[in-house]
Image: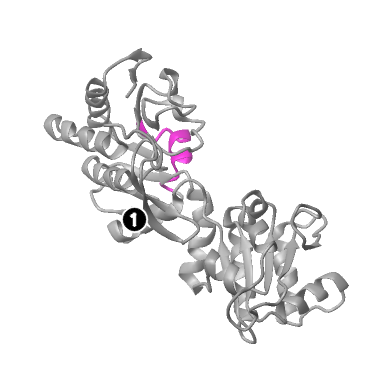
Amino acid sequence: MAAWINGNAADTDAAVDAAATLLATARTPVFAGLSAELAAIRAAYRLADRIGASLDPAAGDGLYAELATIAAGGALTTTAPETLGRADTVLVIGNRPWAGDLVAEVAGSKPVRGRAAGEERSVLSLGGPANGASRHVAYGIGNASLDVAIGHLRAFVRGNLAAEEAFGELAKRLAAAKFGVVIYDAGEIGEAGTEMLLGLLKDLAETTRFFALPLADPFQGRAVTQLSAWTTGQAPRVGFGRHMPEHDPWRFDSARQVAAGEADAALWLASLPSPRPSWLGSLPAIAIVGEGSADARPETAEIVITVGVPGASAGGSVWNERRGVIGYVEATGHAVADTAAGVIAGITKNIEKKGASC
């Protein structure tokens, strides 16, 4: 595996030792990205606890768009297989769900079990593309934002509005569903939109069966959320500065911390593809990235260590969006010796020898 220290090629052991030195002398380090296999994320949480670091996943904004609403009032959710097997009415909100394969698969099939088995499936779109490869009925939202449009639709479903023909028709279609599903991206519709949507589903569920199918982000956010919950009892943005997990999504927003000058070192974990933080070059940093990625280069950070990519050159447990669970993926190619979990464990071991400053 390749590694660089201050732009110069180095062996992995030297880079691990340099990373340990950097973190051991830091006062308020931040760990960002966390787009990696579960073992690496777990190792990052252990290291953060050891040195008093805070953690902020790349998926943070999307996760926090729905976490507060779900914590306050719960959610009626389902999975992709249940949607394909049972749903006779599917509402797709926004544009992001159309970027994947699920909507096309839903539109090209019929329910095969439950009350709607064998019937045609209605695919409806709110605020999404008017035309496309998939047959669907599109409802435009004009200049309104998605959260406002969802609130508007909820008012029609509840009978509080009745004038607008298009939204009235959509409300009737939803109410007539035998097994309905709404596909959406929480990061796209935002916290207000998510709160309004989950309320809409509860309204519909009073007379029929209607469920949410929120799309997972591509940066292992749901895996991070589950690991953080069973490790700390908190959502992902936590800090260990007082050697106990403290949750504060504003305080431990890594971009805010760096901009405010609160952080003096960073570790960016991205053995799986993840957007590089714009602030990464503004403070001493370690980048643990997948081999062959666009960021596997010496200028990415002060210390760069490349590792195996889960599902390609390394095995590992990652989020399986199809099943809605964490599952293990084998290495499809030649497995490499260095994994992100192993590198972080090595950094932790070296810090224990040196002694952390915090």
**In x, y percent, where is residue 169?**
82, 75
**In x, y percent, where is residue 205?**
61, 82
The residue depicted at 58 percent of the width and 78 percent of the height is 113
Where is mark 1, residue-wise? 227
Q: Along the horizontal axis of the image, is 301 left or right of 24?
A: right
The image's colouring method is one colour
The residue depicted at 35 percent of the width and 34 percent of the height is 308
Residue 349 seen by the camera:
yes
Q: Could you tell me how many numbered marks the image carries?
A: 1
Q: Is residue 293 above or below residue 225?
A: above
- The amino acid type of the residue labelled 1 equals Leu
Q: Which residues are magenta?
A: 251-267
Residue density around tag 1, few if under 14, some if 14–19, many if 20 or more, within 10 Å: many
Q: Where's the N terminus, which quadrant? A: top left
**In the image shown, does 25 or 229 lie closer to the viewer?**
229
The residue depicted at 65 percent of the width and 51 percent of the height is 96
Q: Residue reaching furthest top?
A: 8
Q: Along the horizontal axis of the image, is 154 left or right of 266?
A: right
